[in-house]
Amino acid sequence: MRARLFLFAVFGLLGSLVVPTIPQEKSGESTIRELEAKWADAYKQRKVGDLAPLLADDYVITTEDGNTYSKIGFISFNMGPLRVDVSELSDLKIRMHDNVGVVTGLYHESGEAAGKPYDYRDRLTDVWMKIGGRWQLIASHYSIPSKL
């Protein structure tokens, strides 16, 4: 009888150690989804201080016209005299691979550049990597779809 009570106590104690008591950290997918929204908003609001930390130092973007820009090149080129009225993401799909998240989706942007209105509807691919404990964007590719 004592042996049985002892075993129940031991198994009960072991079981309580297995059950997590601390809330789980957000999944990488939900974190990346939030960071995508933050990235689009920082770009729209022209907040370099919010945008720059999201981009890895070796970040590269390929734009609709085939040009590529580094982190500094992208920030310099896109934070100039441009008014962004709409910066919307949709149809996002996120695929996780350990410390890498690959995002595909649709992007809509409109506003005014050089005094002329513009309206873009693109396909996007963003690649996020967990670097030094935080997620950063390492590469982006935007292209004009042949059809939506």
Image (tube, rainbow, N blue to C red):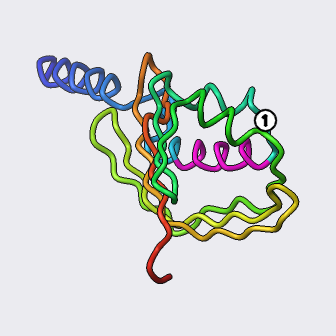
Q: Residue at x 83, y 55 (%)?
A: 114
Asked if the stretch drawn in magenta spans residue 43, the answer is yes
Q: Is residue 99 left or right of residue 5?
A: right
Query: Is the N terminus in the top left, top right, bottom left or bottom right quadrant?
Result: top left
Asked if the stretch drawn in magenta spans residue 39, the answer is yes
Q: Amino acid at mark 1?
A: Lys
Q: Quadrant of residue 39?
A: top right
Front residue of 145/129: it is 145
State which region is magenta: 33-44
The total of numbered circles placed on residues is 1
Residue 14 drawn at (x, y percent): 25, 22
Residue 33 drawn at (x, y percent): 54, 50
Q: Residue at x 52, y 41 (%)?
A: 31
82 over 76 or under it: above or below: below
Q: Residue at x 41, y 43 (%)?
A: 127
Front residue of 102/80: it is 80
Residue 97 drawn at (x, y percent): 27, 42
Residue 15 drawn at (x, y percent): 28, 29
3 over 75 or under it: above or below: above
Q: Is residue 85 left or right of residue 62?
A: right
Front residue of 64/34: it is 64
Q: Residue at x 67, y 43 (%)?
A: 38
In the picture of the structure, the residue carrying the numbered disc 1 is 47
Name the secondary structure under disc 1.
loop
36 over 112 or under it: above or below: above
Front residue of 35/43: it is 43
The residue lying furthest to the right in this view is 115
Prevalent SS, magenta region: helix
Q: Quadrant of residue 48?
A: top right
